[in-house]
Image (cartoon, rainbow, N blue to C red):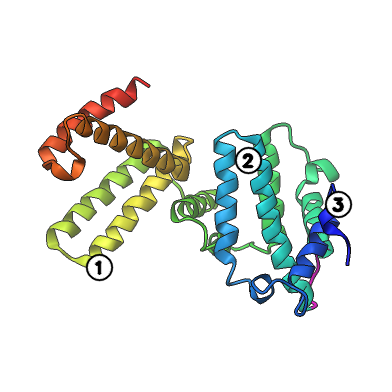
């Protein structure tokens, strides 16, 4: 066995070999060798989000570490397939290189792209051709169901618009959102649980659709707002503690007063 402990620097080939060893039925790690695609599916998602957090924090050292964790997930899933004789890491690299060359027809072919938008349009056209998504319905259906709901709804609406089914402008999108909110109000008034869920979904879908027309990512907007809410709540809690109490001890009226104060404090930061 290779002397891994005393090796100073490692390569992609080393990672592949280490993962294969960890998965070895006899010599491998008791945990690693029994994992399946399904059992570590959430790990892949979590590691990806941790890498995104590092990007948001603008922390290069943390990003380097988190990208390594993402790469480990790729290596693990690839090793599982290699063990079954279906594909190897080399096949993964081969596939992505061929995809990049095919979809960048403005670099490796005769197409032209003077702007980032032109390049993206070329990419999408080549992708539809590659995936045989000639029919509009198939194009929409191919958006992964495992994507976060807001992200998926925005992509579906964007593809529908590319096939001619979209709003003429943001005002029309807002009008549709307002109509969906009115329908949600009606569902709430009638206390129809099924209708409430349906109408709430329509409101969220319409809101995500509006985001396309104001060039704002719905997923990022909601993430930012959630972070803002947490910061304001923590400030409200600090204000309550200054009076010797906690939010749990206060009425909703008292909390509302402190919330207004907290918003002003946070706005000055």
> Within the magenta stretch, is there residue 248?
no
Q: Answer with left or right where residue 211 lies relative to residue 43.
A: left
Residue at screen point 70% across, 47% down: 123
Residues 264 and 145: in front is 264
- In the picture of the structure, the residue carrying the numbered disc 2 is 62
Check disc 2 and report its element: helix, strand or loop.
helix
Q: What label sits on residue 194 in the rendered view?
A: 1
Total number of numbered discs in the rendering: 3
Against 90, residue 210 (above or below) is above
Q: What label sits on residue 7 in the rendered view?
A: 3
Q: Answer with left or right where residue 35 lies relative to residue 95.
A: left
Residues 206 and 16: in front is 16
User: In this orientation, does residue 216 appear?
Assistant: yes
Magenta span of residues:
85-89
**Quarter of the image where the C terminus is located:** top left
Q: How dense is the environment of label 3, judged by Cα within 10 Å: few (below 14), some, or many (20 and up)?
A: few
> Within the magenta stretch, is there residue 88?
yes
Check disc 3 and report its element: helix, strand or loop.
loop
Against 231, residue 190 (above or below) is below
């Amino acid at each position: 066995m290779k002397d891994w402990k005393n090796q100073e620097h490692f390569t992609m080939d080393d990672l592949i070999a280490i993962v294969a060893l960890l998965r070895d039925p006899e010599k491998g790690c008791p945990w690693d060798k029994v994992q399946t695609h399904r059992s570590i599916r959430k790990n892949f998602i979590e590691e990806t989000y941790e890498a995104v957090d590092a990007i948001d924090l603008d922390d290069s050292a943390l990003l380097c570490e988190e990208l390594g964790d993402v790469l480990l997930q790729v290596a693990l899933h690839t090793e599982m397939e290699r063990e079954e004789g279906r594909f190897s890491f080399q096949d993964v690299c081969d596939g992505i290189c061929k995809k990049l060359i095919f979809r960048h027809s403005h670099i490796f072919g005769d197409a032209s792209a003077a702007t980032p938008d032109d390049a993206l349009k070329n990419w999408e056209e080549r992708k539809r051709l590659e995936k045989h998504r000639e029919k509009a319905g198939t194009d929409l259906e191919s958006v992964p169901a495992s994507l976060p709901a807001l992200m998926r709804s925005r992509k579906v609406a964007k593809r529908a618009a590319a096939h001619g089914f979209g709003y003429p402008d943001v005002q029309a999108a807002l009008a549709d959102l307002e109509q969906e909110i009115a329908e949600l109000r009606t569902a709430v008034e009638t206390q129809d649980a099924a209708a409430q869920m349906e109408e709430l979904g329509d409101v969220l879908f319409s809101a995500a659709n509006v985001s396309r027309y104001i060039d704002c990512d719905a997923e990022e907007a909601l993430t930012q707002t959630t972070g803002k809410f947490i910061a304001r709540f923590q400030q409200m809690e600090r204000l309550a503690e200054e009076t010797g109490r906690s939010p749990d001890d206060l009425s909703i009226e008292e909390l509302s007063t402190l919330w207004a104060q907290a918003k002003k404090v946070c706005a000055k930061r």
